[in-house]
Image: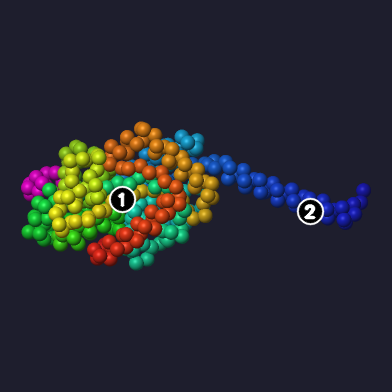
Amino acid sequence: MNRSPKFTSRRSVLGACALAWLAATGVASAQDAWPSKPVRIVVPFAPGGTTDILARAIAPELSTAFGQQFFVDNRPGAGGNVGAEVVSHAAPDGYTLLMGTVGTHGINRALYPKLPYDPIKDFAPVTLVAAVPNVMEMNAQKAKDLNIRNVQDFIKYAKAHPGQFNMASSGSGTSIHLAGELFKSMTGVSMTHIPYKGSGPALLDMVGGNADVMFDNLPSSMAQIKGGKLVALAVTSSKRSSALPDVPTVEEAGGPALKGFEASSWFGLLAPAGTPADVVNRVQQAVAKALDTPAMKEKLQAQGAIPSGNTPAEFAQLIDSEHKKWAKVVKDSGAKVD
């Protein structure tokens, strides 16, 4: 039977509408099904540092919450810039996250003349995972040999032997680096900066006696401090850490020259800009729930970390305020990229 052009046209329109409806519902179903495959958490530093420790602490919690594997992918280099750039170029589909730091999203924009990513425009903040103090530390045997028992001893010896000490860090632009630069600028002490691709490699040289001093994130150094391989001279936060209550702050131990010294670190999850808000919110809620459990609180606090789990909006405000703070520190200290 021949069909009229009018009938054929109507059928074509109905068919097109049906296809459009199927396509739309298919996209919605795909989004609703997230995650339908493993999710990568990029850590922009080598294994063994605090960024890595926190990512590996939260990854299994997210795997359990969503029924899909969340795995850590270490991409060290350039003070965290290599890994951050990887995530900035990743598809905004919820399958790539970054464990960002105060370095990648607070310091580096002021320190590096040209970043390969925009810390604000290229990312969607998810949640702050934890904040930690840094700890000024030395190889225990070296401190004993030089009779350095506290910050004042260190300053006195360093000024009497200018250029003798080298200062290890997890990379140029990290809070570990900037804490040391701030210390140098406030005390007039001369130290040679040696950047590594993360706290893990730096700690190996600290324990081996090949590096002299480090302002490391407390969680990554805690085991070596407790084990007697490293000696903690002071913590860099404004208050003492409950994990090392007998260790004074730099301000307490350093006297008038170090009044107001404060250089804490933070670590949080970010997604590529454009990641669906629903995915961002689901991850934030899962992280907040995991961080609120007694077991996770105890685990992180024992290492000197203060768990958070704040909202994406709150995390975004923190990133903005931290950039302003560290831009001033970079300017005042004269810190440079090595």
Amino acid beneath label 1: Ser
Task: Tell me if residue 87 can be seen.
Answer: no
Which residue appears farthest toward the top when viewing the image? 295
Q: Which residue is mark 1?
A: 265
Q: Is residue 278 left or right of residue 45?
A: right
Q: Position of residue 5 (x, y in %)?
A: 88, 56
Q: Is residue 334 depicted above or below 151 in this figure?
A: below
Give coordinates of residue 173: x percent, y percent. 30, 58
Residue at image location 32% in from the left, 35% down from the top: 298
Q: Disc number at residue 13?
A: 2
**What amino acid is labelled 2 in the image?**
Val
Residue 162: quadrant of the picture: bottom left
Q: Is residue 238 visible?
A: yes
Q: Position of residue 202 (x, y in %)?
A: 24, 49
Magenta residue check for 146: yes
Q: CA gap, disc 1 to disc 2?
A: 59 Å
Expressed as whole percent of the image width and height from the top left, the position of residue 244 reads: 21, 40
Q: Residue at x 50, y 37 (%)?
A: 66
Circle 1/circle 2 CB separation < 8 Å: no
The reply to whether the magenta stretch includes residue 78 is: no
* Residues drawn in magenta: 137-149
Say few, some or many: other residues with alpha carbon within 10 Å of mark 2 (under 14 / 14 to 19 / 20 or more): few
